[in-house]
């Protein structure tokens, strides 16, 4: 059994539609524990740094504009195999390809407005958690 931490964002499209609670419910129903959370409104520099791996891609400027268009919720989720399990719970990037019952299938509006972010590897999880949270802002739940 591997207890992992992963990093999650409820994106501006979901916050605007009052879906924070519905999406948090999905985390908790899946047995993922929220061990840190806050609401932030990203500026361009913070969003560009977060998505640095996508710099230069055709959708990069749109992505940064979208991610800075309104507040987001950022959180750390903890649980068994949390990184892969949360990616499965989110569903594929394009909601039209996301499996039924996944967060993106049920809530996302489009490839860009796709409601949630989740780390894709242990390395990204560590980087992304540290990008938003100091260690003493994370509360072990036992
Ligand atoms: P994720 O890990 O599933 O979120 O997907 P990626 O890391 O590949 O892309 C990051 C984010 O950029 C996605 O969640 C989308 O919001 C956005 N994105 C990715 N590919 C595209 C695309 O082809 N077009 C547009 N408009 N947005 C995209
Ligand atoms: Mg990604």
Image (tube, rainbow, N blue to C red):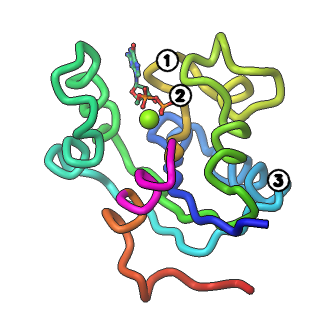
Residue at image location 61% in from the left, 75% down from the top: 35
Q: Position of residue 60 (x, y in %)?
A: 24, 24
Q: Position of residue 18 (x, y in %)?
A: 61, 45
Q: Tell me if 12 is positioned left or right of 5 in this view.
A: left
Asked whether mark 2 and ligand 1 are closer than 8 Å, the reply comes as yes
Does the magenta-highlighted stretch encompass residue 123?
Answer: yes
What span is colored magenta in the figure? Answer: 120-127
- Residue under label 3, please give it: 30
Mark 2 and mark 1 residues within 8 Å of each other at the beta carbon: yes
| Quarter of the rendered structure image containing ligand 2 | top left
Vertical arrangement, residue 63 with respect to residue 28, above or below:
above
Vertical arrangement, residue 96 with respect to residue 67, above or below:
above
Name the disc covering residue 114, or none.
Answer: 2
Q: CA distance from mark 3 to mark 2?
A: 20 Å
- Residue under label 1, please give it: 111
Q: Quadrant of the C terminus?
A: bottom right
Q: Position of residue 105 (x, y in %)?
A: 71, 23
């Amino acid at each position: 059994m591997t207890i992992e931490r992963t990093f999650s964002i409820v994106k501006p499209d979901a916050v605007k539609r009052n879906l924070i609670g519905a999406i948090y419910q999905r985390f908790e129903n899946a047995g993922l524990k929220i061990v840190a959370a806050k609401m932030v409104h990203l500026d361009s520099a913070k969003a560009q740094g977060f998505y640095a791996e996508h710099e230069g891609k055709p959708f990069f400027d749109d992505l940064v504009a979208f991610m800075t268009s309104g507040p987001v919720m950022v959180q750390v989720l903890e649980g068994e195999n949390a990184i892969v399990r949360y990616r499965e719970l989110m569903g594929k990037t394009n909601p039209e390809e996301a499996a039924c019952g996944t967060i993106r299938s049920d809530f996302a509006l489009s490839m860009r407005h796709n409601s949630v972010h989740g780390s894709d590897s242990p390395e990204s999880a560590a980087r992304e958690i540290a990008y938003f949270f100091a260690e003493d802002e994370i509360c072990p739940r036992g």
